[in-house]
């Protein structure tokens, strides 16, 4: 474990404990989606997932990360891609980024990352959300963990998360 990971773990332990509130998927209104942006920032699969959630009458906000200095995508209220300029030397988002994130409360966080991405792990930690779902990867702190091998795209993971959220609420 490197120093960045140790500092993250320390900050995570210092966070106030939270009580996860399992959502009834039909009643979820606001969704925060975390993802690893492709290098050219097109993210067609993630945008298709956003469109699908919008057709289900859900308010969707996308937060991505691309490991490059200059991000060409606009910072919008519903979509943001962070780059190296948005994080400090330890991999944590800068205070203004965290402040922007915490302006809203979300019913559900869907983490579509396929491998640990430190800036997005910070975003997940600082996000004001009732319930978190994502892949069961090392260091994941989600309330619903999906165990599946990493895929080429996050589509399968998204489908599994929604499937289990719908399945569990019917029991």
Image: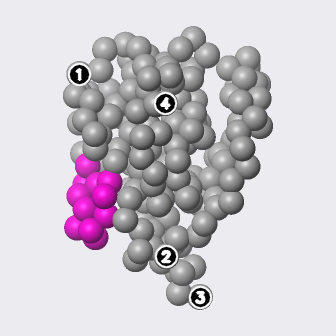
Q: Is residue 149 visible?
A: no
SS assignment at label 1: loop
The circle on residue 72 is 1
Q: Name the residue at 37% across, 65% down.
A: 29
For the stretch drawn in magenta, the main secondary structure is helix
| First-in-chain label (3 vs 1) | 1
Circle 3 residue: 171
Q: CA distance from mark 1 to mark 2?
A: 37 Å
Q: Residues within 10 Å of mark 1 (few under 14, many from 20)?
A: few
Q: Is residue 168 visible?
A: yes
What quarter of the picture does the C terminus occupy? bottom right
Range of the magenta residues?
47-60
Circle 2 residue: 24
| First-in-chain label (3 vs 4) | 4
* Residue 73 % position (x, y): 23, 27
Q: In terms of image quadrants, where is residue 115?
A: top right
Image-based side of 129 in relation to 72, left or right:
right
């Amino acid at each position: 474990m490197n120093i960045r990971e140790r500092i993250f773990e320390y900050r995570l332990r210092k966070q106030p404990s939270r009580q996860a509130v399992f959502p009834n998927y039909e009643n979820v209104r606001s969704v925060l989606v975390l993802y690893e942006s492709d290098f050219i920032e097109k993210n067609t699969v993630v945008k298709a997932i956003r469109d699908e959630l919008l057709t289900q009458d859900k308010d969707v906000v996308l937060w991505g990360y691309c490991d490059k200095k200059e991000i060409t995508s606009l910072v919008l209220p519903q979509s943001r891609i962070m780059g190296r300029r948005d994080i400090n030397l330890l991999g944590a988002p800068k205070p203004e980024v965290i402040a922007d994130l915490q302006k809203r409360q979300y019913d559900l966080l869907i983490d579509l990352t396929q491998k640990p991405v430190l800036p997005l792990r910070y975003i997940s930690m600082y996000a004001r959300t009732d319930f978190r779902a994502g892949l069961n990867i090392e260091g994941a702190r989600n309330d619903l963990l999906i165990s599946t091998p990493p895929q080429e795209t996050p589509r399968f993971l998204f489908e599994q998360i929604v499937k289990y959220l719908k399945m569990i609420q019917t029991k």
